[in-house]
Image (tube, rainbow, N blue to C red):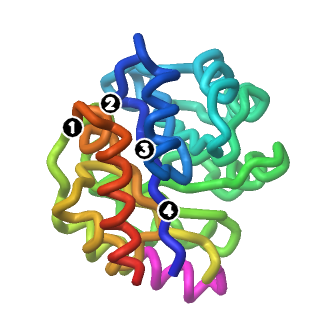
Amino acid sequence: MIARLAPSILSADFARLADQIAAVERGGADLLHLDVMDGHFVPNLTIGPMVVRSVSRVTRLPLDVHLMIADPDRYLEAFARAGAAMMSVHVEAAPDLLETVRAVKALGCRAGAVLNPPTPVDALADAAGEVDYIVVMSVHPGFGGQAFLPESESKVRAVRALLDAAGNREAPVEIDGGIDLTNAGRVVRAGVSIVVAGAAIFEDPDPEGATRRLRAAVMAGAA
């Protein structure tokens, strides 16, 4: 199994963002994860298309844009134009998830669906055959630096089984929240292929070294 590491800039120092992005690139990051929060769907405000566009200018890494927003369909085109390579929307915020997934694909981006901790896996049933990836939230969304919810591992297994049963075996499972060296390998062994980590990387005084160590743990879990 191929596993990839996606540092989340939610925990980065935005006064030094370009330098910190360069550091995780040197450390071997595979993607960059950008959390978009609107203060409505989740109780926090973060970034919009202008920041995504700026980030796209300073990195060669694909941008994994996570839309934690109400009415995501309204903003899909703006984020695609800004440079998103991947766009994920929450099941809980998409009235017609399958239609939204198709709209993201039509814009030339890979389309993901996100599950909050309380949301059952079968909420994805209608879209499981068409999504490009599924994100399992392993914390309650809204803020970085939270503790990993251990029940997320069994949810990852259930999501992997759902994708496989839908004939979508190539679609990866992504995990987001509370990932560090103590659990990165374990979630990969449970079926995760994309590991998002924020505080474990950007709150380290050496984000390049932290990226390298965490990526090694991810690769060990995939071996």
Q: Earlier in the sequence, mark 2 or mark 4?
A: 4
Residue visible at 15% across and 48% down in the picture: 147
Q: Which residue is mark 1?
A: 145
Instruction: Indicate which disc residue 98 carries.
Output: none
Disc 4 residue crowd, few under 14, some 14–19, many 20+, Cα 10 Å: many
The amino acid on which the numbered mark 1 sits, given as a three-letter code, is Gly
Disc 2 residue crowd, few under 14, some 14–19, many 20+, Cα 10 Å: some
Q: Are marks 1 and 2 in contact (CB under 8 Å)?
A: yes
Disc 1 residue crowd, few under 14, some 14–19, many 20+, Cα 10 Å: some
In the rendered image, which quarter contains the C terminus? bottom left
Specify the segment rendered in magenta. 159-168
The amino acid on which the numbered mark 3 sits, given as a three-letter code, is Pro
Front-most of residues 160 and 115: 160
Q: Is residue 23 left or right of residue 154?
A: right
Disc 3 residue crowd, few under 14, some 14–19, many 20+, Cα 10 Å: many
Instruction: Indicate which disc residue 4 carries.
Output: 4
Q: Earlier in the sequence, mark 3 or mark 1?
A: 3
Q: 5 above or below 73?
A: below
Instruction: Indicate which disc residue 11 carries.
Output: 2
Front-most of residues 48 and 27: 27
The amino acid on which the numbered mark 2 sits, given as a three-letter code, is Ser
